[in-house]
Amino acid sequence: MKNILSEQEIQQLRAETRGTAKTIHFNNAGSSLPPDVVVDTVIDYLYEEAQSGGYETEYTYREELENTYSLIARLINARKDEIAVLENASIGWWLAFNGIDFKPGDEIITCEMEYVTNLIGLLHAKKTYGIEFKVIPNDEQGNFQLEAFEEAIGPKTKLIAVTHIPSTAGGMIPVVEIGQIARKHNILYLLDACQSAGHVPLDVQEIGCDMLAVTGRKYLRAPRGTGFLYVRKEIQDKLKLFFMDGFTTQWVTETDFKPRDDARRFEVYEKSRALTLGLGKAVEYALNIGVDRTWQRIQYLAGLLRGKLKDVKGITAHDFGNELCGIVTFSVDGIDAATVKNKLAEKSINVSVGKAVSTLIYMNKNQLSNIVRASVHYYNTEEEVEILCGVLEEMV
Ligand SMILES: *Cc1c(COP(=O)(O)O)cnc(C)c1O
């Protein structure tokens, strides 16, 4: 993969992110360094609320706030009325998932990389609704098995719920092909795109998913405490609602009510307007550079890192599959992941520890407990990759 962003552009982008001057940040799968404009937007908005009043400030910024929905819609090629802005992805996933009218015996198909929140959701649904779920294991090369997936579909299959990019490995699953099969069999499709939003280009029309949950703080570079849920217009009425208030309903009389006619029925009225604006800014920032362009650079940098790690004796890489992303996972012989992380932190290098619980099925299958996760973003540099590898080399 080519490095498509010029040196000058990278320097400009780094100059727009305060954190890059201080920290070598390879924890973008945990939480990216946000662009300055995102941070300033949030802080300025809070100051304005303090000076002018919360409702008054909201009125002043009503168009910008509204624009957050349009920007998110553009990012994933959806419609504005298919987006709910939420505090995180877990809530979004949980609302979508538990909104489905499960009956005892219904079947769900998932992948071995499914995220912990979602796995708990599946187990909970098994206990409470009496559903069953099947896990499609990756093949020996670490690729999702499309044929096994299609074979697993039966008359009782109600949902396919999968994670696009896992939180503790660099592989990806073929979400478009999965969508084609889901549509062919007319099965609901819920996609966890937490690690992919802002990382790889996402197009819900092409993917064909019915629901998609995203967090803001990871590759999207939005503030913590932000996320969104996409729900295809046609299925909004099919999902049960858990919270309702005067905002999420279209009208209320003393004897009846009707939910809003858009995905904001999945929100509640009270939330941080400052963070909603910050999320919008982060999405705008990503759109301005172009996720298709930054994705190429991420692949280039991750490839560089993987290549260099291969040359370091005592390091074992754990990323499998034909399609790899910016998440690079590995172990260092004789040093546990937490110690590696702490030693790197002493040099202002941030990586994180991928815990077994995050992707339990995959980690158990591969007998992994804790691994080191270095997740690169487009604003990282070749030099930073060199420094990381240099420090690791000294360590082993
Ligand atoms: C981080 C993550 C989540 C959860 O996102 P929150 O915003 O923390 O709820 C879900 N799925 C995957 C794959 C993740 O990496």
Image: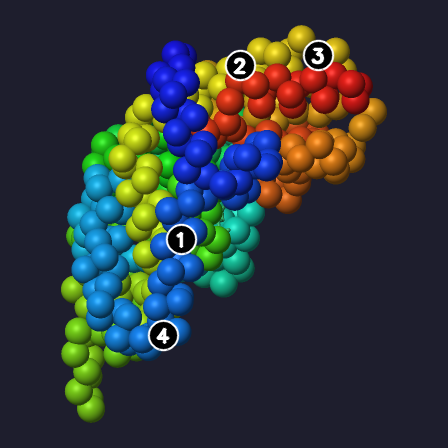
Q: Quadrant of the N terminus?
A: top left
Distance from label 2 to label 4 (Cα)? 49 Å
Q: Name the residue under label 2.
A: 304
- Identify the mark nearer the N-term, 2 or 4: 4
How far from the left and from the top, in percent, is residue 337?
73, 33
- Residue at the (31%, 63%) spot, across then down: 266
| Mark 1 vs ligand 1: CB below 8 Å | no
The residue tagged 4 is 51
Q: Identify which amino acid the numbered label 2 is placed on.
A: Leu
Q: How many labels sit on residues? A: 4
Q: Which quarter shows the C terminus?
A: top right
Mark 2: give few (<14), some (14-19) or many (20+) Cα within 10 Å: some
Question: Does label 1 or label 3 sit earlier along the sequence?
Answer: 1
Q: What residue type is labelled 3?
A: Val
Looking at the picture, does residue 145 appear above or below residue 265? above
Camera-nearest residue between 29 and 145:
29
Q: In this view, does 106 lie to the left or right of 142?
A: left
- The residue carrying mark 3 is 312
Give the mark nearest the N terminus, 1 or 4: 1
